[in-house]
Image: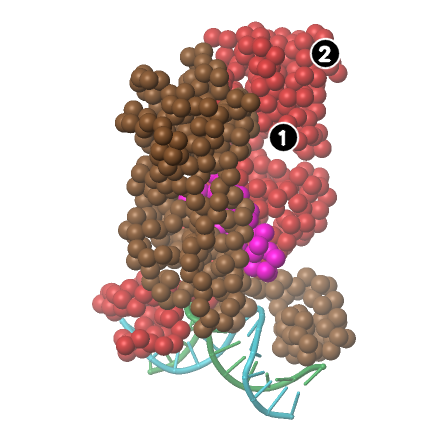
Chain colours: A brown, B red, C green, D cyan
Amino acid sequence: MSKKKSDKTTIHDIAYELGLNASTVSRALNNNLAVSKKTRELVKAKALEMNYQPNFIAAALRRGRSNTLGVIVPAIDRAFFGRVIRGIEEEADEAGFRVIVCQSFDSSEREREMVDTLRGLQVDGLLISIAKDTGDNLKLYEKLISSGFPIQFFDNVPTSLEVVPAVIIDDRQGGYAATKHLIDQGYKRIAHLRGPQHLHIYRNRYLGYLDAMKEAGLEVNDDSVLEIVSHFDSGEEAFEELWKRSPRPEAIFSASDFSAVSGMKAARRRGLRVPEDIAFMGFSNEPFNELVSPTLSSVDQQPITMGRIASRRAIKAITSKEDEEHPNDQLVLMPEIVVRESSATK
Amino acid sequence: MSKKKSDKTTIHDIAYELGLNASTVSRALNNNLAVSKKTRELVKAKALEMNYQPNFIAAALRRGRSNTLGVIVPAIDRAFFGRVIRGIEEEADEAGFRVIVCQSFDSSEREREMVDTLRGLQVDGLLISIAKDTGDNLKLYEKLISSGFPIQFFDNVPTSLEVVPAVIIDDRQGGYAATKHLIDQGYKRIAHLRGPQHLHIYRNRYLGYLDAMKEAGLEVNDDSVLEIVSHFDSGEEAFEELWKRSPRPEAIFSASDFSAVSGMKAARRRGLRVPEDIAFMGFSNEPFNELVSPTLSSVDQQPITMGRIASRRAIKAITSKEDEEHPNDQLVLMPEIVVRESSATK
DNA sequence: TTGTATGCGTTATCAT
DNA sequence: ATGATAACGCATACAA
């Protein structure tokens, strides 16, 4: 009663059961117009009955196309990337593409490996937010791009050379808008906790800060700016350091929500009221911003939109004719500030 | 100067360049002992020079084995799952396996689709934390298991029928330990914010709470327990509701960190001191627990360990001889409580 | 409308 | 130690 052999049903098994040829079955399953409605239904019923499971990799090998997108991000447990991936998947789903996600853990070496792995898996396109230390490791990507392989960068993108196809947000505008908001709330001595300046995202947030301060005619000196390194702990120390300086800041714009939250913690430990005594503004709009008290104002980076657009652009590059020119430009999204308790003077 | 044709180098191209046969190249690349050291090095050098990229799916098709694990989780942006995945990947890496991660978004329908997709991708094994609404949708998994397909469940696992191969934590013990900790700190009127009781993880946390209360001879009545539904907002309402009751609780053990944090927020808004006036204990040890103030005590679920073990067990089932019996038992991990400011009376 | 033949890139089983 | 050949499961050009 039981077929001893390997469980897996193939189109040949279906064809045999139905007295048909495998190619007819293949066509029927793919809704090929050539096959008669009758046999198509017959085949599909049989396939269901036999619990047929199409072998995608065999099809991909034959077709030379896997209908799969590869995604590489530094870490999937960062809320921002989680949302970007969601956007990518939504768009891919609609276009009949699958998505494979890998993590580089912010290591350019592992990033390289992941690229190889995904290419070995025959993904049709690549979506990448590069690792922090992927600085000049870019020959690989240059090669890929110039070979015409569909690739889209997003968020953290290579900047060293020419323009690469990418979807990014305008960090400078984000930094500007955040600072401008604080200014509009009446704060004048606004400090900035900036991230590592060799990363252009942090550099741009800093430049945006400067733009807004200059525009308002507010002073920025060495005491106004402090550079932070790791996310978690340094916010408290950073706050203490800033607080020691004179004049003391009235508001702090941090390039990271993590530092902003721990900065707020340090401020409150000193008995300061937020935002009455000191206001805070973060960047990234992490979900925990709603959870902390006071809730933290921040800059939203439109992650879902970013994912959807990057996905769409990659799919377009894949499905468009080879000879068509792919628009290898950078698409720049505008961030949006989200005002919460930490900066709302009402 | 440029080869017009498709960029992709195959073992045939390498063989041609070297005046060898493709099978020799294949053997050399796979470090087959049969091939001479000299040719092996020759082949590898040429492969590098020609920028050869092995086609994994072709190899998988031929071998009948992809060396790939499929993972399905409700959502990758939940810190717990992010860490589990990290554990899975660490272990997989060491064993030369790749990992493909999919999200079910807590929809059993999508979960089904993901299973099909991954099987179509010819993954050698499946690791699944089932969606919240995957209740009796289990015929699929029954079939898979009884067909001998390597599958490991983790965290949220099907409970309806027989025992399935799984790695879980002892939620009841976690609930017990959390409550016991509060008791040891001197609290007597301890309330519990419990999750939906049709999910066994929440049911067990609740039972653990009862165990500890009973053991200490403390009263539990209808007023001691409140059921919460969604994560984010309900913590504040839940706290207000509990606070209305009499006698008022001295401590709250919440089955979720989210509700605990928002509960704390509500408590502090009322001017209460935590933990002096009211203590809080959460569950899951979310990273933001360190960020909020006061920092939130919680129960750690050992996600990395869970991932590593599930991964190891799946790989073992894959690589062991077919006839060997796979240990299809449940492995139970012990949770660990993490004491922070919200419950530390010193 | 359906069948036949071939190949995608690799590995395994034969030979040699 | 290496070569020739077949096969994995599928899709397609071509024939019927």
Q: Label 1: how many residues lie within 10 Å, few (<14), some (14-19) or many (20+)?
A: some
Label 1, secondary structure: give it.
loop
Q: Is residue B167 left or right of residue A122?
A: right
Disc on the earlier residue, 1 or 2 = 1
Q: Label 2: how many residues lie within 10 Å, few (<14), some (14-19) or many (20+)?
A: few
**Dot 2: chain letter:** B
Of the residues shown, which amino acid type is indicated by label 2? Arg
Residue A223: image location, x then y, percent? 29, 24
The quarter of the rendered structure image containing the N terminus of chain B is: bottom left
**Dot 1: chain letter:** B
Question: A127 or B88, which lies in front?
Answer: A127
Of the residues shown, which amino acid type is indicated by label 1? His
Q: Which residues are magenta?
A: A74-102
Residue at (33% x, 70% y) in the render: B25
Q: Which circle marks residue B32 in the picture?
A: none
Residue B196: image location, x then y, percent? 69, 30
Residue B159: image location, x then y, percent? 68, 38
Question: C11 or A43, which lies in front?
Answer: A43
The answer to whether residue B63 shows anywhere in this view is no
Q: Which circle marks residue B231 in the picture?
A: 1
Question: Can residue A304 be found in the magenta stretch?
Answer: no
Q: Which quadrant would residue B235 be assigned to in this image?
A: top right
The answer to whether residue A290 shows anywhere in this view is yes
Q: Which circle marks residue B245 in the picture?
A: 2
Residue at (74% x, 67% y) in the render: A45
Q: Is residue B110 left or right of residue B99?
A: right
